[in-house]
Image (tube, rainbow, N blue to C red):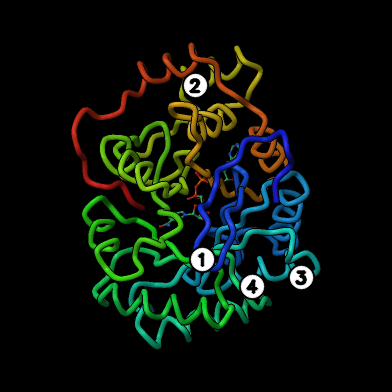
């Protein structure tokens, strides 16, 4: 799934899955399959990203009302085994039986027999015990290899891990970029303690309550230029930087533009120097207290 010299994030072994490594940068698909770009360009972008090592592809039944999953299915039609495929279930479809149906619909659109990872898109009102039961059934049927959650804050994670089977949660996907660092206060440390990696959505700061136009921020532009990087590469290298020597973040930028895809893939090889990290910390410090989880 990853080339040997590039940085990776490790998913822990479970009862029926071996430990595996994933690239620190994957590909998002929000707004694909909605007619905003030509379908052939979206397919080409995902295949280009795959060729360049961004083998994790993130989608959801929500995106384009299933349209993004259809695009991903076409992109992977003859290369499914090259990708680590992630999709998500709406909270209101995450019941004991409804989650099975929702997953089967996703699989049909994706033209595949299994997902590598299936996430609960955000916390809802269906009891987590029911969702976990459905996820375990899907695993037993070979329809998903692993499961996880998205937009879960510290208290949501505590509720999840208190449920039987909840501690098998493989990842938590949350909004994370240089301009929105709230998770660094308590969510990220607690996930690290439990060896649960993060997937960082909106890593280029294109969304979120605290979203800013970091791609055009004068400091970011000049710091990137000094290092012969693009602003996007600086942001991706920052989001996926190791903390205390360990990587635990997979960023999932979405890109249709060919140049953007190349840019993002080249960020897989960038290790930020300490001076850059310190300067970025000074410009965009993490909050000193707990803040509400940022979402889009
Ligand atoms: N779990 C959740 O609740 C949740 C919420 C939001 C997003 N997500 C996931 O996270 C993914 C990423 O988030 P996002 O799509 O909202 O935001 P993003 O990845 O931060 O930004 C995407 C935008 O940035 C542009 N872009 C990409 N690479 C670039 C580069 N190298 N230079 C300049 N611009 C670049 C893209 O343009 P082009 O497309 O024109 O190249 C697109 O307009 C989503 O696609 C989705 O899979 C999950």
Q: Mark 2 = which residue?
A: 220
Q: Earlier in the sequence, mark 3 or mark 4?
A: 4
Residue 117, placed above or below residue 219: below
Residue at the location (34% across, 56% down)?
A: 151
Q: Give the crowd class for mark 3: few <14, some 14-19, many >=20 residues within 10 Å.
A: few
Q: In the image, which disc is placed on residue 146? A: 1
Residue placed furthest toward the right: 78
Q: Give residue 102's position: percent from left, percent from top.
A: 47, 81
Find residue 38 and report its image quarter: bottom right
| Picture coordinates of residue 92, whole percent (x, y) | 33, 77
Q: Earlier in the sequence, mark 2 or mark 4?
A: 4
Labelled pair 2, 1 in contact (Cβ < 8 Å) = no
Residue 70 image label = 4
Give the label on residue 77, or none: 3
| Picture layout, residue 45 above or below residue 133 | above
C-beta proximity under 8 Å, tags 3 and 1? no
């Amino acid at each position: 799934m990853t080339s040997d010299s590039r940085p990776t994030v490790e998913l822990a072994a479970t009862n029926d899955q071996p430990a595996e490594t994933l690239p620190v940068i994957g590909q998002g698909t929000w707004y694909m399959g909605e007619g905003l770009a030509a379908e052939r360009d979206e397919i080409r972008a995902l295949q280009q990203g795959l060729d360049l090592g961004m083998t994790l592809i993130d989608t959801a039944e929500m995106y384009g009302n299933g349209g993004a999953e259809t695009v991903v299915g076409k992109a992977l039609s003859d290369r499914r085994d090259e990708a680590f495929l992630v999709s998500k279930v709406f909270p209101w479809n995450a019941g004991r039986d409804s989650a099975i149906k929702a997953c089967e619909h996703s699989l049909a659109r994706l033209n595949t027999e299994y997902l590598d990872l299936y996430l609960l898109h955000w916390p809802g009102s269906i009891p987590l015990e029911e969702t976990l039961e459905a996820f375990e059934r899907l695993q037993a049927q070979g329809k998903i290899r692993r499961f996880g959650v998205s937009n879960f804050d510290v208290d949501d994670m505590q509720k999840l891990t208190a449920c039987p089977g909840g501690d098998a949660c493989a990842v938590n996907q949350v909004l994370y970029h240089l301009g929105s660092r709230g998770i660094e206060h308590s969510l990220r440390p607690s996930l690290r303690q439990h060896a649960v990696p993060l997937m960082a959505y909106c890593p280029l700061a294109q969304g979120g309550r605290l979203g800013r136009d970091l791609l055009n921020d004068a400091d970011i532009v000049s710091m990137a230029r000094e290092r012969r990087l693009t602003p996007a590469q600086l942001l991706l290298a920052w989001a996926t930087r190791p903390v205390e020597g360990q990587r635990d973040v997979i960023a999932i930028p979405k890109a249709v533009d060919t140049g953007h895809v190349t840019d993002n893939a080249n960020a897989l090889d960038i290790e930020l120097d300490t001076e850059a990290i310190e300067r970025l910390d000074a410009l965009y410090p993490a909050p000193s207290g707990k803040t509400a989880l940022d979402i889009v």
